[in-house]
Amino acid sequence: MKKAIFGVLAILIMASLLVGSIGCSKESEVSALKPGTTLYVGTTTSLYQTGLWGYLEPMFEEEYNASLHVLSLGSGTAIKYGTNGDVDVLTVHDKAAEEKFISEGNGVERVPFAYNYFLIVGPEDDPAGIKDMTPEDAFKKLYDEGEGKFVSRGDSSGTHSMEKRIWAAAGYSDYDAVKSAGLAAGWYIEAGSGMEETLRKASELEAYTLTDMGTFVSYKAELSLVPIVDEGAILLNVYSVIVCTKSTTNNEAKLEMANNMVDFLTSDEIQELIGKYGVKDYGLQLFTPCFENEPTA
Amino acid sequence: MGTLWDAVVQALHLIVSLDSEVVDITWRSLRISVASTLLAALVCIPLGGLITFRSFHGKRLLINIIQTLYSLPTVCVGLLVYIFVSHAGPLGMLDLVFTPTAMVIGQMLLITPVMLGMTISALGAVDKTIKDTTLSLGASEFQAIWAIIKEARFAIVAALLLGFGRAISEVGAAMLIGGNIWRYTRVLTTAISLATTQGDFALALALGIILIGVAMIVSLAANMIQQRR
């Protein structure tokens, strides 16, 4: 009996070792089959969770014989990973942070390739009465009257940066003061999560939130939120692709593949596909292509 | 309630039809966690044997420290390993960040304390006379440790299973070290987390059912093996 158990155990251990080694060999097999370079892309959540990256990924892999690894992060995290040399290409939407990233020598060039608009969404009955105001006035009213809750991303993403910009434009240059006053008064809620999760929280809490158009349109059907403020120059949302210098400086293959990515996203064919993406499913354009034609508010 | 029911039906369908995405993620999860458990076992069993067998200054303290590390938060292990394997970190040149290999290392670090601690208590529970007898029969230290390990094999296997259960069910380290990359580092837990935020409750639930199933089978096995003792 004991021998039998021992035998079974031995077989199990052998089997799992085999499984482990298959696991290892499989990865090298994959890279053997695909001699192309592995490229890590750090992207803002909105380009990933709308499904755009999942749609583009196989096309890029096939065209350039590459293995693409896409990480869905907030723009802030993506830029941090780029600074560390852990991702090779960024697709992000935070102009100020992007320019800082490049001026510190971490990125080659900021290449805008698509845009849409941010909008403030909220419950249909609009408890704070901010419908169709300018974004700046809407934020002022939220702050002054505290009649409506506001869910913030609170994660230093591109959307969070945009929220801070609107606060500043509304005359509240000290964002931390706004945040602590709002948190104390109970109308400001810090989600600390990605865009779609933040939208879900706002929907559950009957609160307002700031969102990019693409993510809102793709999840609209599951949310009890409607557009409240969708006009204002400040709401422009531009997505750029940036080649990171840290990971590509001493790696020619990577640099070439990273440049391929920029060429790919800015090619006529892909620009057109980005413009059409989601239109069939949602009846609305999620992203407007804008290579060499960056809109300025 | 309707959504939940729909999700359950769809989830079961995804599992029964062996949906390629579900199978792929499950298979990757098992591979990574089995690898990390085996690597941890390679450290824990011999080390546990030595710690049990030898008496040295600070042994009690060492065992206390090991036991304190049982509750090591997964997300902190993830953060620490990320800092080390990041290209800006000391092990950056190994290109390990956001790879399955890094996830194996992270999970191994995570479960080593609990497996080591349980191995030590398993070996400590073996009758002292076995050690004395084997030694008096002229066995070397290695042979005596081996005899005790053999005697405690059921409890040791239970320790391995417990470690495996912790490895496969953790999300914090897998997310931070692996990055949840599709078809590369996406495992059950990180896929559940992503699918939930994307509102794909059917996929999240299907993966959840599989994860619960694996975890329950493992702890059932651990219980049965321990009762054997």
Image (cartoon, rainbow, N blue to C red):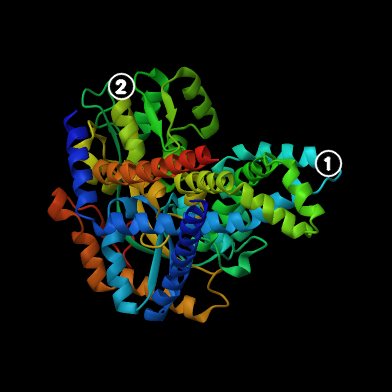
Task: Label 2: state its secondary structure.
Answer: loop
Q: Which residue is mark 1?
A: B58
Residue A168: x and y in percent read 47, 37
Q: Chain of mark 1?
A: B
Q: Chain of mark 2?
A: A
Q: Which residue is mark 2?
A: A128
Identify whether A81 is placed above or below A137.
below
Residue B14: x and y in percent read 22, 50
To which quarter of the image does residue A64 belong? bottom left
Identify whether A11 is placed above or below A122.
below
Please identify, in this view, whether the residue under mark 2 or under mark 1 is nearer the observer: 1
Left or right placement of residue B84 versus residue A209 in this view? right
At label 2, the amino acid type is Ala
In the image, A174 versus B31, the foreground residue is: B31
Residue A98 visible in the current orientation: no
Q: Residue at x 74, y 42 (%)?
A: B128
